[in-house]
Amino acid sequence: MALVGAVGCVKQRTTLGPPPAPNPPPKIARDVNVRVQTLERLAASYSELAAKLPGPDPSGHRKLMAEVFARLNKILPTLEGPSSDAVFRQQLQVIADAQSQLAAGPTDLSPDPTIDTGLRSLRDVLASIAQADYYDREELTPHLNELTTKINDLDTARGPVHQVVVGEAVKVSAQIIEAMARVLDQRLAQQNSTMPATAPSKLAK
């Protein structure tokens, strides 16, 4: 009977299948034209959202930042492209966790640490994406430096001042994202005008 029980346990374990991979790659369109069009739309929507910050009150600010992180979880994979590494996926998970905590976490706790953590991951992701050889670093570097300054200012900002600095940081990130979207659109237009239709695009990483 003990042997039968053991066999039964083994059979049950072998039918469960492998566990899901941690931080699986996000699904991104491999068609570069679709990717660029999607990015332009998302970047414009993100800029409109950034313009609403800081929120009218702590509760409203919290909701807006939850939406900011939700938008970023669509924008950043589109910027990165279909081939993302584990470090990128880990940073994206930090942003997703920040969104979840702001949207459904305890409202009696200050959202500032969660927001700061999410924004630091955003800065790291944008800085990493900017290293791609088709981005104009001269255009992006001043914005990235400004974003780093704003995020560092969060360490000493409190209350309404913290909300203002958060809003400024998100607005700078919107400028970076729009600049990246603009560069991708320009590079794609150049490639479409000079390369055969069947040639692979360098933008499809």
Image (spheres, grey):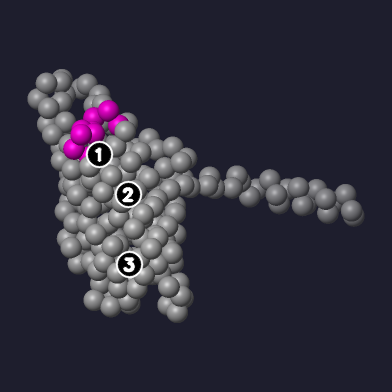
Q: Residue at x 34, y 58 (%)?
A: 153
User: Which secondary structure lies at badge 3?
Assistant: helix
Task: Give the Cα separation between the discs numbered 3 and 1.
Answer: 24 Å
- Residue where numbered disc 3 is placed: 162
Q: CA distance from mark 3 to mark 2?
A: 15 Å
Q: Which residue is mark 2?
A: 148
Residue at the spot 42% in from the left edge and 57% down from the top edge: 117
Q: Earlier in the sequence, mark 3 or mark 2?
A: 2
Residue 83: x percent and y percent?
Answer: 38, 35
The quarter of the displayed image where residue 185 is located? top left
Observer able to see residue 189: yes
Residues shaded magenta:
132-140
Find out whether the residues at labels 3 and 1 contact each other: C-beta distance under 8 Å.
Answer: no
Which residue is at the front of the view, 27 or 157? 157
Residue linked to disc 1: 141
- Earlier-in-chain disc, 3 versus 1: 1
Amino acid under disc 1: Thr
151 up-or-down from 30: above or below: below
Residue 102 horizontal/vertical position (percent):
40, 68
